[in-house]
Image (cartoon, rainbow, N blue to C red):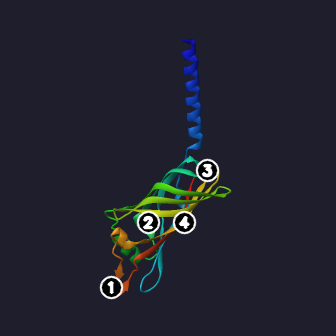
Amino acid sequence: MREFKNISSGIWSLLVTFLFITQVSAQEFSLINGESSLTVFGTSSLHDWHIEAEAQSGSIEFRDASNCVIKACRVKIVSESLKSGKRSMDKNTFKALKTDDYPNVLFQLVEVKELEDKGNGKFKVRTIGDLTITGVKKRLDLDFIVEITDEKVSLTGEKNIKMTDFNIDPPTALFGTITTGNDLTIKFTTIFR
């Protein structure tokens, strides 16, 4: 009986140690909207244009933050927060994004494919994730740079997509005389604390 108590006590000690280590290394950070930026760049038959996200939220969770072992990452952008500074263009953007039916653009990390330690808390990360726009979910490759400090995590990268891949008809204006290009470039610096 005494031997059983010693074994039981040892198992409990191991379990408590394991839970403590798991709690210390698993960390979750929340997206800071005011410090983050996301800009969509496009073209038209008249001039190049861009829109910026004013409202985004999300989180990143690590199994081991010091080694950039990412467990999960989610980002949500309010579709009607994508603004150009020009009311008519914003109206066309919201119409193309069908914001009445699909109020958010969503990104969800699916898998980390490759991780390269660049030193000093900086990592190059190749991932696969699901991007959902106008209710259409597409799995895509996304590469970004992660910088980790004690209090902050930043993700910086860019991705090229096509509007038509998400069932978006490139907007037109002035009875079709101004047309928008199908190709978009999304550039982001996302800050989590």
| Residue for point 46% across, 56% down | 109
Residue 25 lies in quadrant: top right
Q: CA distance from mark 1 to mark 4?
A: 33 Å
Q: Secondary structure at mark 4?
A: strand
Which mark identifies residue 81? Answer: 2
Q: Nearer the viewer, mark 2 or mark 3?
A: 3
Residue matched to label 1? 176
Q: Please, what is the three-letter code of the amino acid marked with disc 2?
A: Ser
Could you give the CA–CA distance between mark 2 and mark 3, rounded to whole angstroms?
A: 34 Å
How far is the residue under mark 4 from the one under mark 2? 20 Å
Residue extending farthest to the top is: 1
Mark 1: amino acid:
Gly
Mark 1 neighbour density, 10 Å: few (under 14) some (14–19) many (20 or more) = few
> Quick one: SS at disc 2?
helix
Mark 4 and 2 residues: CB-CB less than 8 Å, in contact?
no
Q: Which element carries disc 3, helix, strand or loop?
A: helix
